[in-house]
Image: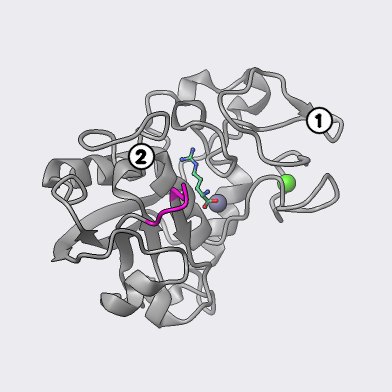
Amino acid sequence: DLGVITIPVYVHVVYSNSNENISNAQIASQIAVLNDDFRATNNDANQTPSEFAGLVADTEIQFNLVNTFRYSNSRTSWGTNDAVKSAYPPITPETHLNIWVCNIGGGILGYAQFPGGPSATDGVVVGPNYFGSTGYLSAPFDKGRTTTHEVGHYFNLRHIWGDGRCNRDDFVSDTPSSDAPNYGCPSYPTVNCRSNDMTMNYMDYTNDACMYMFSEGQKERMRTIFLAGGARDSMIN
Ligand code: ARG
Ligand code: ZN
Ligand code: CA
């Protein structure tokens, strides 16, 4: 067993105005949210309905901010085609999680690369106004859960609806089958595919305040990539 895994993090802030040049406090708030969410020390985990309460996982993955880099650039939106990573390449992505904080545009909150992709584009990208839980933020995505969701993808998690209809799988057995993303703040129970959706899972599309758990099955799927031969085993020293 690998025990508690600590992921070293580099944050690249790419800004075209002073709002986008988010404060160190805002960056620290995001690292704190990641640590709370991945260790199940988030103070809203107790809202989990009893049906799913036994599945709330401490993933035993934690995050350590190593360095922050700041780049001024006149470009005001960066899209989802990795342009920001070409301009500012990741630093030792084999061992470090690289996070670019920049305006993506098009209403996109964030995007991530799954394990096993090219190292030159490895990491996650999040808009400055969706990053962290204090500072320059846009409700209802102002509690740092976009980064939690994107890091979930970076650790091999799929959306809980499997990006398809009831017959598509997220390859996690304890997340109930679902038809499509849920948005806003769904009431419990929300029934699809003849079971209650786990709408409070970080890998759904609900508001930040309405997502507060990873499942034990997701923990298992994430941690598998760090085992010898796994797609991110180079992150384990
Ligand atoms: N749309 C993005 C993705 O699929 C992020 C969604 C984040 N949701 C949130 N409530 N913060 O990767
Ligand atoms: Zn997603
Ligand atoms: Ca499932």
C-alpha separation, residue under disc 1 versus residue under disc 2: 28 Å
Quadrant where the C terminus is found in the figure: bottom left
Q: What's the image's color scheme?
A: one colour
Picture coordinates of residue 181 (x, y %)? 67, 40
219 is higher (above) or lower (below) than 49: below
Q: Which residue is mark 2?
A: 144
- Determine the main secondary structure of the stretch shown in magenta: loop
Say what amino acid the circle numbered 2 marks: Gly
Helix, strand or loop at label 1? It is: strand
Helix, strand or loop at label 2? It is: loop
Near mark 2 (Cα within 10 A), the count class, few <14, some 14-19 or many ≥20, is many
Residue 18, numbered label: none
**Magenta residue span:** 104-109
Near mark 1 (Cα within 10 A), the count class, few <14, some 14-19 or many ≥20, is few
Image depth: mark 1 or mark 2 in front: 2
Say what amino acid the circle numbered 1 marks: Ser
Residue 119 in view of the camera? yes
The quarter of the displayed image where residue 6 is located: bottom left
Q: Nearer the viewer, residue 30 or 72?
A: 72
Residue at figure coordinates x 65%, y 34% from the top left: 182
Q: Nearer the viewer, residue 169 or 72?
A: 72
99 is higher (above) or lower (below) than 162: below
Picture coordinates of residue 28 (x, y %)? 19, 44
Picture coordinates of residue 139 (x, y %)? 38, 29
Q: Are marks 1 and 2 in contact (CB under 8 Å)?
A: no
Picture coordinates of residue 152 (x, y %)? 50, 53
Q: Is residue 7 magenta?
A: no
Q: Which residue is mark 1?
A: 195
